[in-house]
Image (cartoon, rainbow, N blue to C red):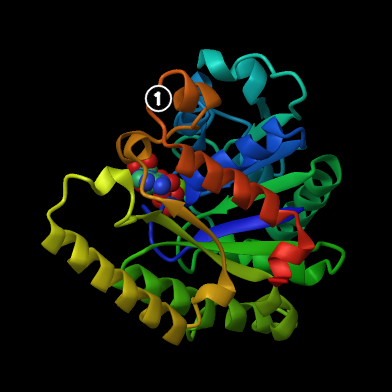
């Protein structure tokens, strides 16, 4: 399964959620890989605690492959290269977990035919080799988005799903909707590049991130007036989301606001949950659920 992860804004939780989803899927035994297509800021290595790739690799990463035509981009094995104890050494029964990092200090670059072709080749190879491939795209109407839209339009043998991440606020709901349905949104740009609009629309779902839950024990310190206000906001956001076609029927997952992730971009391990008791079970469960739904056709269609 090939999945493009996008968001209209930066700071939505797209990378942290996507990384945790591939991690949870690998723990269940799937072979997983993460492609860092956030070309202006390739920092996914930090989430996996890969010391040589905190802000991309010095050379030979995705920029070198796509822009310079190097034969194959570098691939890091999280189980071998992570400096976090809990990630080093593949757990029994787990699948592979690989990261394709970008190159440090190199920025965004526009799509041109050579780049689009190399991108398509890479996507096809990764999709053949792994059970789940998540491609983390630069935010907004970015070159990265244009490149993968063009790559998938020229090669109908590539089947992909799209996840649009957004926070549970007014501004983010409207922005996420516009990234998909707006004038220069994914659907229109995709159609211009040769995608069938209905097929593309059916391949897009939304993920709400860092969603506060008024009924969670985390909110125990709030006054009744504050809780009532949160409830009221939540209700209004549901109405707004429905009006903007980002409502329940279009949502694949909802990740609660998490105290660990609020402070640090990282993978939440079972030890963080059970042993150290710093991570919330609800958050890890939400990542697990999303990892399952991504590869489950019935959950995707909404049966
Ligand atoms: N569920 C969550 N609860 C709280 N904070 C979160 C959650 N998900 C992500 N974050 C935090 O939000 C910030 C932005 O997340 P990131 O994944 O880097 O966003 P993006 O890739 O969309 O720019 C990070 O500091 C991250 O740790
Ligand atoms: Mg990111």
Q: Secondary structure at mark 1?
A: loop
> Along the horizontal axis of the image, is 150 left or right of 189?
right
> Along the horizontal axis of the image, is 188 left or right of 194?
left
Q: Is residue 177 above or below residue 257?
A: below
The spot of residue 92 in percent (x, y) is: 74, 18
Depth order, front residue of 132/193? 132
The spot of residue 69 in percent (x, y) is: 71, 44
Splitting the image into 4 quarters, where does residue 186 fall?
Answer: bottom right
Residue 106 appears in view: no
Residue at (24%, 48%) from the top-left corner?
219
| The residue at label 1 has a CB less than 8 Å from ligand 1 | no
Q: Is residue 14 above or below residue 282?
A: below
Q: Is residue 228 above or below residue 66?
A: below
Q: Quadrant of the C terminus?
A: bottom right
Q: Which residue is mark 1?
A: 277
Count residues near mark 1 (Cα–Cα under 10 Å), then give few for <14, some for 14-19, many for 20+: few
Depth order, front residue of 9/53? 9
Residue at (36%, 49%) from the top-left corner?
257
> Along the horizontal axis of the image, is 172 left or right of 129?
left
The spot of residue 149 in percent (x, y) is: 66, 68
Residue 3 appears in view: yes
Residue at (79%, 44%) from the top-left corner?
131
> Along the horizontal axis of the image, is 69 left or right of 178?
right
The spot of residue 122 in percent (x, y) is: 76, 48
Q: Is residue 93 above or below residue 111?
A: above
Q: How many marks?
A: 1
């Amino acid at each position: 399964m090939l999945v493009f992860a996008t968001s209209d804004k930066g700071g939505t939780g797209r990378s942290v959620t996507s990384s945790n989803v591939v991690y949870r899927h690998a723990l269940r035994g799937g072979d997983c890989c993460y492609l860092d297509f956030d070309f202006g800021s390739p920092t996914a290595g930090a989430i996996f605690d890969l010391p040589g790739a905190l802000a991309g690799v010095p050379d030979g990463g995705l920029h070198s492959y796509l822009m310079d035509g190097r034969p194959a981009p570098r691939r890091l094995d999280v189980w071998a290269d992570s400096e976090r104890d809990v990630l080093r050494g593949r757990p029994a029964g787990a699948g592979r977990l690989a990261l394709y990092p970008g190159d440090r200090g190199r920025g965004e670059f526009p799509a041109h035919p050579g780049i689009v072709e190399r991108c398509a080749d890479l996507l096809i190879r990764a999709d053949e080799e792994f059970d789940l491939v998540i491609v983390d795209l630069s935010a907004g109407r970015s070159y990265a988005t244009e490149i993968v839209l063009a790559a998938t339009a020229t090669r109908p043998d590539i089947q992909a799903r799209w996840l649009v991440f957004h926070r549970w606020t007014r501004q983010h709901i409207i922005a996420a909707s516009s990234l998909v349905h707006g004038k220069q949104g994914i659907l229109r740009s995709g159609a211009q590049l040769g995608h069938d609009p209905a097929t593309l629309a059916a391949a897009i779902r939304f993920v709400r991130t860092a969603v506060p839950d008024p009924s969670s024990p985390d909110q125990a310190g709030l006054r009744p007036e504050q809780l009532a206000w949160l409830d009221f906001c939540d209700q209004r956001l549901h109405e707004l989301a429905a009006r903007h076609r980002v409502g329940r029927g279009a949502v694949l997952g909802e990740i609660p606001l998490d105290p660990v992730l609020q402070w640090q971009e990282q993978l939440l391990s079972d030890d963080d949950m059970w042993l150290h008791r710093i991570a919330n079970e609800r958050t890890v469960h939400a990542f697990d659920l999303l990892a399952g739904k991504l590869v489950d056709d019935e959950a995707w269609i909404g049966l």
